Amino acid sequence: MSGRSSAGMARVAVALRCFADFVAARPGLPFLVALHVEWSHVTGRWAIKGQLHGDGAAADLERWALALDDPSVTSYESEGYYVGPHEHREVHGTVHGHQVSVWAHLPIRGGA
């Protein structure tokens, strides 16, 4: 493994450790069904993305927004083969300076 790769992996380990400590200190945060870590070319840091699932996902996103530093919310409507018409809603924020986002697909009820 090259020095650059091992240094990068050390930094991702720090980001994951910070995230794990954050979650451990807040046992009431809603459960994430998936966790994804990726390099952000915009910030030059590792970013962590989590996925929520279930009937309470809208309220769960609110709870994550309250927990993250500097939260913001984005959303858009879409239609997927498996999930049908839905709203993709995402909460963005930081944990000890690391970018964190939590997202969910919320069903669109009522339609035309």
Image (spheres, rainbow, N blue to C red):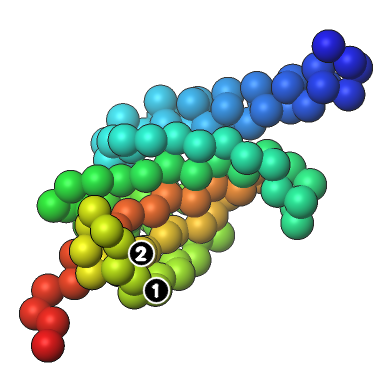
Q: Position of residue 36 (x, y in %)?
A: 51, 37
Q: Position of residue 63 (x, y in %)?
A: 31, 52
Query: Residue flagged by tag 2: what amino acid is it?
Result: His
Q: Position of residue 31 (x, y in %)?
A: 28, 36
Q: Can you tell which quarter of the image residue 65 is in?
A: bottom left
Residue located farthest toward the top when viewing the structure as drawn? 1
Residue located farthest toward the left when viewing the structure as drawn? 110
Q: Dots 1 and 2: beta carbons under 8 Å?
A: yes
Residue at label 1? 76
Q: Is residue 59 above or below residue 110?
A: above
Circle 2 SS class: strand
Q: Residues within 10 Å of mark 2 (few under 14, many from 20)?
A: some
Circle 1 SS class: strand
Q: Can you tell which quarter of the image residue 47 is in?
A: top right
Q: Nearer the viewer, residue 25 or 92?
A: 92
Position of the N terminus by quadrant: top right
Q: Is residue 12 left or right of residue 82?
A: right
Q: Is residue 40 above or below residue 23?
A: below
Q: Is residue 15 left or right of residue 3?
A: left
Circle nearer the N terminus (1, 2)? 1
The residue drawn where x is 89% and y is 15% is 2
Residue located farthest toward the right when viewing the structure as drawn? 3
Spatial CA span between label 1 and label 2: 5 Å
Q: Nearer the viewer, residue 64 or 50?
A: 50
Residue located farthest toward the front when viewing the structure as drawn? 81
Could you say which disc has been placed on residue 36 in the image? none
Could you say which disc has been placed on residue 88 in the image? 2
Q: Is residue 46 above or below residue 68?
A: above
The residue drawn where x is 23% and y is 69% is 85
Q: Is residue 11 above or below residue 86?
A: above
The residue drawn where x is 58% and y is 23% is 17
